[in-house]
Image (spheres, helix red, strand yellow):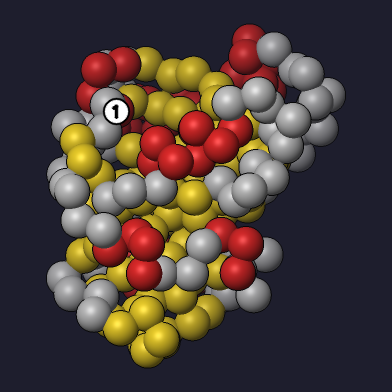
Amino acid sequence: MTQLTVYADTDPSKVLIETRAAAEIADLLSDIGVVFERWNASVLLPDAAAQEDVLKAYEADVKRIMEKGGYKSVDVARVTPDHPDRAALRQKFLAEHTHDDDEVRFFVEGAGAFYLHVQGKVYRLVCERNDLISVPAGTTHWFDTGERPHFCAIRIFTSPDGWVGHFTGDDIATRFPLFESAA
């Protein structure tokens, strides 16, 4: 279930806020410039659905977001528990980083956790099917898929180069609960 937990960035044992209410999540994240929306992922696609099929199923919503944000590129990322590179993919984004472009993701299936490090706090948002998150360019964050990842997300961006991660070198991600510990 979608859940936002806010911690002091100096103490992962100190929970400042915890909520599962979508409206409250959207309000709290909007205060730091992050967009959170609940869509209806009503189309059930087969596990091996091609990128074209996923994009076609959500064409109207994707078009709306792309037009609103001036985005020019879209693709689909799918990682499954049997993906041969799942451990390397997890490690790649499990360190704090930024992007030159907004990070817009709509979860078609499965789940993952975004950790946003902003204004002395860490916002841990466990996203699942139906969740859209838009993280502004330059926001420090990391993403965890878990040891047995299962998610399919539509990724929307201005240019393919914009989502390349710029790692901060800070080990903060090692101090906070992993995706598996989602309540």
Is residue 135 visible in this depiction of the protein?
yes
Vertical arrangement, residue 22 with respect to residue 67, above or below:
below
Is residue 61 visible in this depiction of the protein?
no
In the rendered view, does 15 fall on the left or right side of 44?
A: left
Disc 1: which residue? 163
Which percent across, then down, holds residue 48? 78, 18
- Of residues 4 and 147, the one nearer the viewer is 147
Instruction: Specify the amino acid type for callout 1.
Output: Trp
In the rendered view, does 19 fall on the left or right side of 169?
A: right
Which percent across, then down, holds residue 89? 49, 33
Q: Quadrant of residue 74?
A: top left
Which percent across, then down, holds residue 57? 68, 23
| Residue beneath the point at 80% across and 26% down | 47
- Of residues 176 and 40, the one nearer the viewer is 176
Q: Categorize mark 1 by other alpha carbons within 10 Å: few (<14), some (14-19), many (20+).
A: some
Label 1 element class: helix
Numbered disc total = 1
| Residue beneath the point at 19% across and 35% down | 166
| Residue beneath the point at 62% across and 14% down | 51
Vertical arrangement, residue 65 with respect to residue 181, above or below:
above
